Amino acid sequence: MTRQEPATRKKYLVPFMLVVSLFFLWGMAHNLDSILIPHLKKACQLNNRQSTLVDTAVFLAYFLMALPAGMILKKWGYKISMILGLVVFAIGAFLFVPAANLLSYETFLIALFIIGCGLTILETSANPYAAVLGDPAKATSRLNLAASFNGLAAMIAPFIGSVFILSGKSFTETELAAMPDVSRSAYFLEEAASVKMPYIILGAVLLLIALIFCFIKFPEIKTKSIAGTPQGSFFSVLRHRHLSWAVVAQFFYVGAQVCVTSFFIRMAQQGAGFDEKTAAYYLAIYGLLFMVGRFVGTALLQFVSSHRLLALYALISAVLCLIAILGDGAYVIYALGGIGFFMSVMFPTIFALGINGLGDDTKLGSSWLIMSIVGGAILPYGMGTLIDLNNDHIQIGYTIPMFCFLIILYFGLKGHQVKTNTL
């Protein structure tokens, strides 16, 4: 047995490294959305609610594609699912070119929806694959390690966005009205055009990774069910009480994360008086703290149970939201940066706790947890509505993520406990 263990680890190493690259790539997509929201708000002349449709387009795809993605995974396995996800993701990225040329917000939303479909297929397959690809006792740590590279993307994407997408040019409604029609149209087209090159490069990288996947052998991991627990249908899998609570917790976590990042730049401009590019640099620092939090959290999980760490981090995040709501000046941004650190381990930890002990139901449970990402489509829209109803007061909107962290706190304390109801 001892001789086989190094060989087994070596067999898993290359597939695991490639799966880690997927975490980085979908992290790039999500964190570029934080740049796109204020950018397209300016380029397409949107209000707060309309600008959050960027999130709605992406995360609605998670909800609608979760069941098909689960079926694809169940029928064709992890490798083909991941390749398909990469190709669909790339198609959406390339659609940014006609969207920018037409200055069509609707076309941008279609492109983002297609990207979301690709991300759904990727996450439905890659998250559980990272969890089961090795020692079951280290599933949570392994998933957090992979997700740490999602955190790396959270730091890099805002920097790329600030350099290649954000222009730093901003005009008031009065200044825009005073411009000649030709100059105003040229300004909007120039703003929209800046997204083309980053997304062309992203699409090309995605196709290259998909090609590499085609030539690498991926072990198809077989899982074992809990004794006496039959394999369920898509809906009956929710008899696992801890999975049901994980779906709820994941819904509110993703909603909270997207709320925090979607309005980060606007918060930095309004609350701390930063200009657009400086606000984007602070968003990159937020991403750095998110990444550091992932690595620190992965290390802490060697000594602290995952549900206790989750509960502690959720409580701290709720307190930091309160500081962001009531604070003033740069302290508001410091609080949001702290949320990035403590929020970092939540998604993979909730995911791993949710699929714990599911056995043959793991793939179906994964689909439910990916479907719950629809929280990122619903809650930011609610936050944008709340902000619009309060005369564009950004801080009041952060009461929504604060409530979300309290739900996650309960999951960490009680909801994670494994219990399967009989049908």
Image (spheres, rainbow, N blue to C red):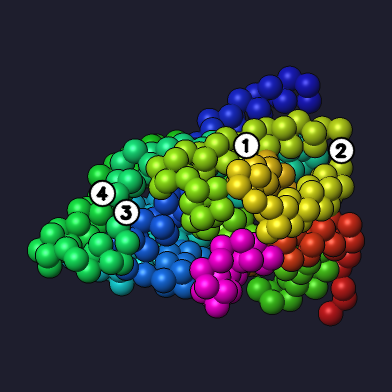
Name the element at disc 1.
helix
Asked if one can make out residue 261 in the rendered structure from this viewpoint, the answer is no
User: What is the C-alpha distance between the residues marked 4 and 1?
Assistant: 27 Å
Query: Residue under circle 3?
Result: 170
Residue type, numbered disc 4: Ser
User: What is the C-alpha distance between the residues marked 2 and 1?
Assistant: 20 Å
Q: Is residue 327 left or right of residue 93?
A: right
Number of the front mark, 4 or 2: 4
Mark closer to the chain start, 4 or 2: 4
For label 2, count other residues whose C-alpha is less than 10 Å away and answer few (under 14), some (14-19) or many (20+). few
Residue drawn at x 24%, y 64% is 176
Name the element at disc 3.
loop
Query: Residue under circle 4?
Result: 194
Query: Residue under circle 1?
Result: 289
Q: Is residue 272 magenta?
A: no
Residue type, numbered disc 1: Leu
Whether residue 229 is situated above or below residue 288 in the rendered picture: below
Residue drawn at x 73%, y 76% is 236
